[in-house]
């Protein structure tokens, strides 16, 4: 399923690593013997595990809400990345644009990872509004690259879901 989504290859690889729960979060680094704080770089409230950072963190949830609220979905976040991909794909038929819909989880996860690394390695952070805009622009760019015949605004892409 991951390899069929029309996203950049490095993002497909990243999503595959997420599904395997081996992305180098604080928890996975500590398992390798590296001494550091286990706290989530986005919110600092809980330990940074794959499921917390990409599915349950308060900051990441705001990115999910961009798309969930758009379709007024009744959504309970699954416990695992693989479950999320399967359930999210099952909603693709209601969106009208199946292929675009399937891009969304990878877009959220990639945006989350980029922000996490900005905070971790550069000691900088974006506002939640900037994070949302970055996610939407990335989504628009990926859709434009693969599915659009001409230039469309971010708003038009969102309307089409």
Image (cartoon, rainbow, N blue to C red):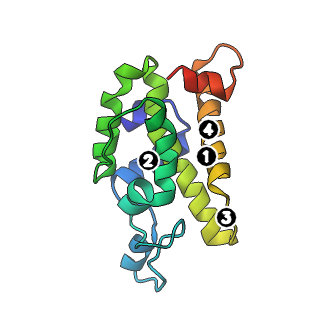
Q: CA distance from mark 4 to mark 3?
A: 18 Å
Disc 4 target residue: 136
The disc at residue 62 is: none
- Position of residue 117 measured from the top left corner of the image (x, y, whole percent): 60, 64
| Pointer 1 residue | 132
Identify the image quadrant of the N terminus.
top left
Neighbour tally class for label 3: few under 14, some 14-19, many 20 plus, Cα within 10 Å = some
* Residue 144 makes an appearance in the image: no
Q: CA distance from mark 3 to mark 1?
A: 13 Å
Rendered residue at 33%/43% (across/down) = 84
How packed mark 1 is, by other alpha carbons closer than 10 Å (few <14, some 14-19, many 20 or more), is many
Work out how far the residue at label 2 is from the one at label 4, CA to CA, in angstroms. Answer: 18 Å
Q: Quadrant of residue 55?
A: bottom left
Provide the secondary structure element on which disc 4 rests: helix
Mark 3 highlights which residue? 125
The tag earlier along the polypeptide, 3 or 2, is: 2
Say which label, 2 or 4, has the lower sequence index: 2
Query: Does residue 79 appear anywhere in the picture?
Result: yes
22 or 125: nearer the viewer: 125
Q: Is residue 18 left or right of residue 87?
A: right
Secondary structure found at label 1: helix
Which of pointers 1 and 2 lies earlier in the amino acid sequence?
2
Q: Residue at x 33, y 54 (%)?
A: 20
Q: How many marks?
A: 4
Q: Give how far apart the Cα atoms at labels 3 and 2 are.
A: 23 Å
Residue 15 bears which disc, if any? Answer: 2
Depth check: 155 or 41 in front? 155
């Amino acid at each position: 399923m991951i390899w069929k989504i029309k996203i950049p290859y490095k993002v497909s690889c990243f999503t595959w690593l997420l599904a395997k729960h081996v992305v180098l979060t604080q928890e996975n680094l500590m398992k390798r013997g590296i001494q550091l704080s286990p706290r989530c770089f986005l919110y600092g409230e809980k330990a940074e595990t794959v499921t917390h950072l990409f599915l349950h963190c308060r900051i990441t949830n705001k990115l999910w809400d961009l798309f969930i609220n758009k379709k007024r979905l009744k959504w309970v976040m699954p416990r695992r990345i693989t479950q999320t991909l399967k359930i999210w794909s099952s909603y693709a038929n209601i969106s009208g644009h199946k292929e675009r819909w399937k891009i969304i989880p990878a877009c959220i996860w990639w945006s989350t990872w980029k922000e996490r690394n900005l905070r971790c390695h550069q000691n900088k952070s974006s506002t939640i509004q900037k994070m949302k805009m970055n996610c939407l622009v990335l989504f628009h760019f990926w859709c434009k690259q693969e599915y659009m015949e001409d230039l469309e605004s971010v708003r038009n892409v969102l309307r089409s879901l």
